[in-house]
Amino acid sequence: MTHSANLFSLKGKKGLVLGLANDHSIAWGCTKLAHELGAELLVTCLNEKAIGYVEPLTKPLGIELVACNVEDAGAMEALVNRAVAKMGHLDFVIHSIAWAPLDDLHGKVIDSSSVGFARAMEVSCHSFATLAHLCAPHMPAGGAMVTMTYLGADEAVPHYGLMGPVKAALQSLVRYMAVELGPQNIRIHAVSPGPILTRAASGIADFDDLMRHAVEKSPLGRLVQLEEIARLCNFLISDAASGMTGQTLFVDAGCHAVA
């Protein structure tokens, strides 16, 4: 019988983490903890320029870092091929990327351009489906895929604008992917963190007000910490979460539970 403590270990697990931007990134929190728990990793950042900023994080840990802009033709295919060539197979994927053009993000949803809406949907939502399509054949023993969402998918959050409908689509995608990939024992989840000051969040207008409101609203009376988000994500990709799939799980100090 497997010792219960081993269920939380990632020793021997091999995975991809997309979206490293800096040491405040959710992707970095997940990467650091997954490495500590024994996982072998391939991690991405946006482009070659970004590598110079984030390689000081990954290099001391011996983690390979590659550039991957999901809008570039063939970029995700090349990424998955590189990961499989390096590690042989995949056990998990953590998708922590989101983007929208600032003009569309800062304006009203009804004023958003069709091009901006489509690009936001492609980067923040459909890229997760594409990633699953590419990775699933290389997950022979099953595994888990996790993406990031936000409360603005469920409620109309001031200044979240265009990303609200995009994240709502992402959460729906998670449910459909869970049904489609369940027979392969591949589990799919969305994690919904409370507001933290990541590079992506910095593009949202009046983000300081949003964080202040979260502190006032949350039952725990504080913001969630990067390490807490990472612990939930790494639980979901571990064997300890083997009976769970198709869910959106909140790690937001309880904000989602309060009207």
Image (cartoon, rainbow, N blue to C red):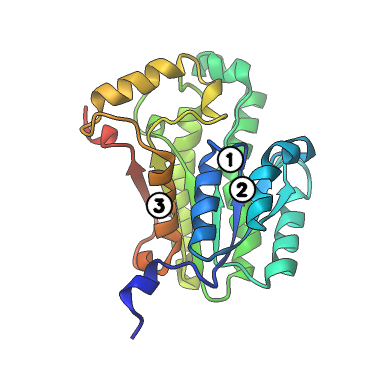
Of residues 200 and 245, the one nearer the viewer is: 200
Q: Which residue is mark 3?
A: 231
In this rendering, the answer to whether 44 lies above or below 164 is: below
N-terminal of the pair, mark 1 or mark 3, is 1
Q: Is residue 191 left or right of residue 68?
A: left
Q: Is residue 179 left or right of residue 94?
A: left
> At 38% across and 45% down in the image, what residue appears?
228
In this rendering, the answer to whether 47 lies above or below 210 is: below
| Of marks 2 and 3, the one in the foreground | 3
User: Mark 1 belongs to which amino acid?
Assistant: Ile
Q: Quadrant of the N terminus?
A: bottom left
N-terminal of the pair, mark 1 or mark 2, is 2
> At 72% across and 67% down in the image, what residue appears?
86
Pointers 1 and 2 in contact (C-beta within 8 Å): yes
Q: Quadrant of the C terminus?
A: top left
Residue 196, horizontal then vertical, whole percent? 44, 31
Visible residue check, residue 132: yes
User: Mark 3 belongs to which amino acid?
Assistant: Arg
Label 3, secondary structure: give it.
helix
> At 58% across and 75% down in the image, what residue appears?
140
Mark linked to residue 18: 2
Label 2, secondary structure: give it.
strand
Q: Residue furthest front?
A: 60
Residue 189, horizontal then vertical, whole percent? 43, 53
Visible residue check, residue 158: no
Image quarter for residue 234?
bottom left
Q: Which residue is mark 1?
A: 97
User: Mark 2 belongs to which amino acid?
Assistant: Leu
